[in-house]
Amino acid sequence: MSLFRPRKPSRAGARLSVWEMLFGGKFPFVNTNSVKWRTIGNGYGADVVFPSSGGPSGGGWEWQTPKRELDPNAPVAGPSGGIYTAVNISPENPLVTAGMLDLTTGDNLAALAGIWMALKPVPAKVVNPPGKPAGTYYNVPQLPAVNAVSGSPLAGDMDNPGLYWALIRQFTACTT
């Protein structure tokens, strides 16, 4: 994701002199663990880097493979070695537009569009599971979280071992 592009002036003159005075002719920004700089045309772009591993606990996250978009027909890997699996749910995904029967509640629930992290392995959708009315069921990513501890002050407790999903970032519609 490019955030902004500082550009070295391309022509001699007052602007180039200011650039030289401020930065001594050198690029003023430094790569870090979370931001990497690259050349774009006559300017620079910043790329945000999400660590797949690292930090003091060796944790992080990686995108689901081979596709980032969540597909209920395929299982999602849970955490392994401190690395969590992230999935994308676009606003056009059928889980958002039509919903699916939730394996925990039995209700037809629509997922919330965004980037989600699997807190434990998520099985593929299940057809006619035992003890449930006939239908196709899935652990639908949603808020408030299904299986969260209810009651104040623990409503939405993310430490509950029954949770399958955690929201990383919600997608919102842009209106003008």
Image: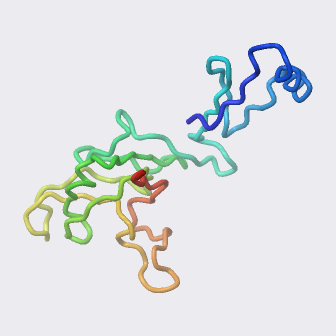
Q: Residue at x 67, y 37 (%)?
A: 35
Q: Position of residue 141 (x, y in %)?
A: 34, 59
Residue 66, quarter of the rendered image: top left
The answer to whether residue 81 is above or below residue 157 is above
Q: Residue at x 9, y 69 (%)?
A: 133
Left or right: 120 in relation to 7? left
The answer to whether residue 154 is above or below residue 25 is below
Residue 14, quarter of the rendered image: top right
Q: Position of residue 104 (x, y in %)?
A: 26, 69
Q: Residue at x 42, y 54 (%)?
A: 172
Q: Position of residue 39 (x, y in %)?
A: 66, 21
Q: Position of residue 155 (x, y in %)?
A: 46, 79
Q: Residue at x 84, y 25 (%)?
A: 19
Q: Nearer the viewer, residue 137 or 93?
A: 93
Q: Quadrant of the N terminus?
A: top right
Q: Nearer the viewer, residue 94 or 123?
A: 94
